[in-house]
Image: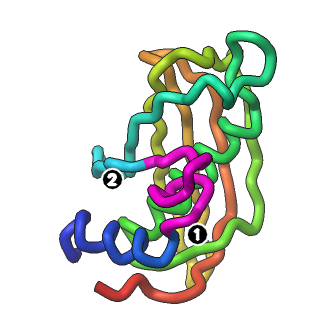
């Protein structure tokens, strides 16, 4: 497999304005520093104050974006394919604190041709805040 940093650089060159991961998007989440951990992709995220919903609680849409983005990156980095989300099922387990550091994880659990089943979770410490399962469709290879 090509170097993780090389593959990430190719992806970033195409998606610098992405709301989830684009480092050139001034209002985006700037999800970055992905690592491989036991066959999954992980990253850390600390929300900005204006991502809140209720006072002190991170907006659920931000959690959904974090999970969708991390799951897509797991396909791009581990499977070497760009993907689009076909279906995303979310389960919010606990209120999401707005001032916490999150660890997000994406795991490709099955690939059949263009169809990838991917799972994700967002945690604060050891507490699962939200979980996701989705169907993603491969669009083209990530060329490095």
Name the residue rendered at 66%, 36% in the picture. Answer: 63
What colouring style does the render use? rainbow
- How much space separates mark 1 and mark 2, taking CA atoms? 15 Å
Task: Return the x and y of residue 23 as percentages of the image width and height.
Answer: 45, 56
Question: Which numbered tag is attached to residue 39?
Answer: 2
| Residue, disc 1 | 116
Q: Quadrant of the N terminus?
A: bottom left
Residue 86 sits above or below residue 49 on the image:
below
Residue 63 sits above or below residue 79 on the image:
above
Name the residue rendered at 46%, 42% in the picture. Answer: 105
Residue 108 shows in this picture: no
Residue 81 is a magenta residue = no
Name the residue rendered at 70%, 16% in the picture. Answer: 57
- Residues in magenta? 16-31
Residue 44 sits in quarter: top left
Question: Which numbered tag is attached to residue 88?
Answer: none
């Amino acid at each position: 497999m090509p170097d993780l940093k090389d593959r990430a650089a190719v992806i970033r060159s195409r998606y610098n304005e992405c709301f989830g991961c684009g480092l050139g998007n001034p209002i985006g989440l700037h999800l970055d520093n992905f690592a491989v951990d036991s066959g999954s992709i992980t990253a850390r995220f600390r929300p900005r104050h204006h991502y809140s919903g209720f006072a002190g609680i991170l907006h659920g849409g931000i959690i959904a974006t974090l999970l969708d983005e991390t799951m897509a990156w797991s396909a791009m980095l581990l499977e070497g394919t760009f993907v689009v989300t076909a279906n995303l099922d979310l389960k919010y387990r606990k209120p999401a604190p707005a001032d916490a550091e999150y660890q997000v994880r994406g795991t490709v659990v099955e690939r059949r041709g263009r169809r990838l089943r991917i799972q994700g979770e967002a945690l604060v410490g050891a507490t699962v805040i939200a979980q996701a399962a989705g169907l993603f469709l491969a669009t083209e290879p990530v060329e490095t």
